[in-house]
Image (tube, helix red, strand yellow):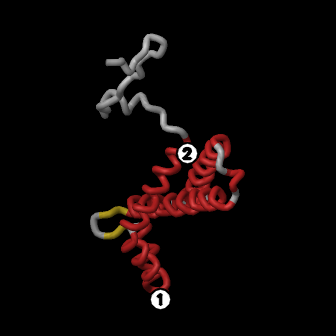
């Protein structure tokens, strides 16, 4: 019987089991991978917090009294949730929307332009997506927390 492994060709390493504690911490995910994962996370975050979004919209546009209650919720809190926590949740929603929107534009551009489907464009556009979404979220978060 003939051997599949010839002396001129070395046997390739086999990876059968991935240990989450030893293999995953040393794995470096490229920027496009981070954007892809965060795109899914931001979509899930917006979906899960949809009742909070609807409540914020409903309370803010109902009347002047309800808008005053809405702004008071951001300053004083609601029940056991302090105001800073509600602002933090709103900031997470702001980031989720911005990241999901910018990453969606990136995906649309890659679908429309065939020249944009390359490793270099994927890496550079992923970095731009990450920087833009974080920078815009920080600017809007500074406004939300009253820094300017």
Q: Position of residue 93 (x, y in %)?
A: 47, 63
Observer-side mark, 2 or 1, equals: 2
Q: Secondary structure at mark 2?
A: helix
The percent coordinates of residue 89 (x first, y second) are 42, 61
In the picture, the quarter occupied by the C terminus is bottom right
Q: Residue furthest front?
A: 1
- Left/right of residue 108 with respect to residue 12 in the rendered view: right
- Is 63 rendered above or below residue 75? below
Question: Where is residue 31 shown, x and y percent of the image?
Answer: 55, 42
Front in this rendered view, residue 57 or 121: 121
Q: Nearer the viewer, residue 29 or 71?
A: 29
Say what secondary structure mark 1 lies in: loop
Q: Nearer the viewer, residue 136 or 143?
A: 136
Q: Residue at x 67, y 45 (%)?
A: 121
Q: Which residue is mark 1?
A: 63
| Residue 14, label in figure | none
Q: Position of residue 110 (x, y in %)?
A: 64, 56
Instruction: Name the residue carrying label 2.
Output: 32
User: On the rendered image, what quadrant is the N terminus found in?
Assistant: top left
Residue furthest out toward the top? 7
Circle 1 packing at 10 Å, graded few (<14), some (14-19), many (20+), is few
Residue depicted at 62% across the width and 42% down the height: 123
Distance between mark 2 and mark 1 Cα atoms = 44 Å
133 relative to 37 in the view: left or right:
right
Labels 2 and 1: the sequence-earlier one: 2
Picture layout, residue 23 above or below residue 90: above
- Please report the residue visible at 44 percent of the width from the left and 11 percent of the height from the top: 7
Residue at the spot x=42%, y=77% of the render?
A: 54
């Amino acid at each position: 019987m003939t051997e599949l492994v010839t002396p001129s060709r070395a046997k390739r390493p086999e990876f059968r089991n991935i240990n989450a504690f030893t293999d995953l911490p040393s794995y470096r995910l490229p920027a496009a991978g981070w954007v892809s994962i965060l795109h899914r996370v931001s979509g899930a975050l917006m979906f899960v917090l949809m009742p909070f979004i609807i409540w914020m919209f409903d309370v803010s546009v109902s009347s002047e009294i309800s808008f005053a209650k809405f702004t008071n919720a951001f300053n004083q809190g609601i029940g056991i949730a302090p105001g800073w926590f509600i602002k933090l949740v709103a900031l997470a929603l702001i980031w989720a929307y911005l990241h999901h929107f910018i990453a969606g534009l990136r995906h649309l551009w890659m679908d429309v332009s065939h020249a944009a489907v390359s490793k270099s464009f994927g890496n550079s556009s992923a970095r731009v997506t990450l920087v833009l979404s974080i920078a815009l979220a920080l600017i809007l978060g500074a406004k939300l927390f009253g820094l300017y």
